[in-house]
Image: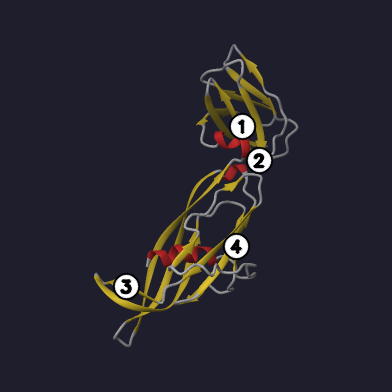
Amino acid sequence: MKKIYLSLVALSLSMAALAQCTPDPSVTKPGISPAKLPDGIVGEPYSQVVTLLVPLDSTILYQGTPYNIRIDSATVVSIGDLPTGFGYEANKATRTWNGGEKGCARLFGNPIASSVGFYVVSVKVRTFFKIIGLPNQLDQLDSSTIDFRVVMGNSLQEFAHGNNLIAYPNPVNEALSIELPSYSSNAQFSLFNNLGQDMQITPSFSPQTGEIKFNTSSLTAGIYMVYGQSNGKNYQVRFIKQ
């Protein structure tokens, strides 16, 4: 039954628009295909089509006892913890799918640097079913999760899970200072906006304090990231420009 709920996550968010997609005719196993969604890459528009096949017959633990069941329908009750800037379009405008039905959805968005990381999307689904041999319809509310990841792209991807640094003041108006545990002459640090665009601001290094400094006076208000490498280690820090 859990596969049903993981599958429905891709079809539950859009009430106003229908996805421009076609279910994969080769999918015959209940569940969702592909089994793992590709990463969202900062700075690159994201679009991924998934195919869903809801089983008609299954088994369920009801009050501790396993039963063979016939699924009538399943409704997504709620979804939470999605990355910023992402949305869904389903090929059905409702949040309810019949047993044995195949559908598809398109996940789309523009990944931003401030959303880099792993996400555990929570899904609650109420399934309506009948125990085979019995006339009454029953229902059960279940919770499940599906993982999704947003990463930096191209040469920045290797820095996406680097060591965290300390930046101050944060929020900052003009001069941003970043403490480094070690510094080498070939160190490279760059500042990016939340769309993954390099702001082309060259930092200065203070050997007395062991800090790098960025002049942020030209930046507009928002969230920014600094990624860099020194002595073979990757570093990152997020800050807010007032």
Residue holding disc 3 = 59
Name the residue type under label 3: Thr
Q: Which residue type does callout 1 highlight?
A: Val
Residue sitting at x 43%, y 57%: 145
In what element is the residue under mark 2?
A: loop
Quadrant of the rendering where the N terminus is positioned: bottom left
- Residues at marks 1 and 3, CA–CA distance in whole angstroms: 51 Å
Asked whether disc 1 touches disc 3, contact meaning CB atoms under 8 Å apart, the reply is no
Of mark 2 and mark 3, the one earlier in the sequence is: 3
Q: Is residue 106 above or below residue 231?
A: below
Per the image, label 3 sits on a secondary structure element best described as strand
Hey, which quadrant is residue 172 in on the image? top right
Q: Are marks 2 and 3 in contact (CB under 8 Å)?
A: no
Residue 242 in percent (x, y) is at 68, 37
- Measured Cα–Cα span from mark 2 to mark 1: 10 Å
Q: Which residue is mark 1?
A: 226
Number of the label disc, if any, that sits on residue 106 = 4
Local secondary structure at mark 1: strand
- What residue did someone put label 2 on? 196
Amino acid type assigned to the residue bearing label 2 in the image: Gly
In the picture as drawn, the residue positioned furthest to the top comes out as 208
In the rendered structure, which disc, 1 or 3, sits on the residue that comes first in sequence?
3
Using the rendered image of the protein, determine whether residue 239 is visible from the camera's viewpoint. no
128, above or below 87, in the image: below
Residue drawn at x 51%, y 31% is 164
Rounded to the nearest whole Å, what is the CA distance between mark 3 and mark 4?
29 Å
Q: CA distance from mark 1 to mark 4?
A: 32 Å
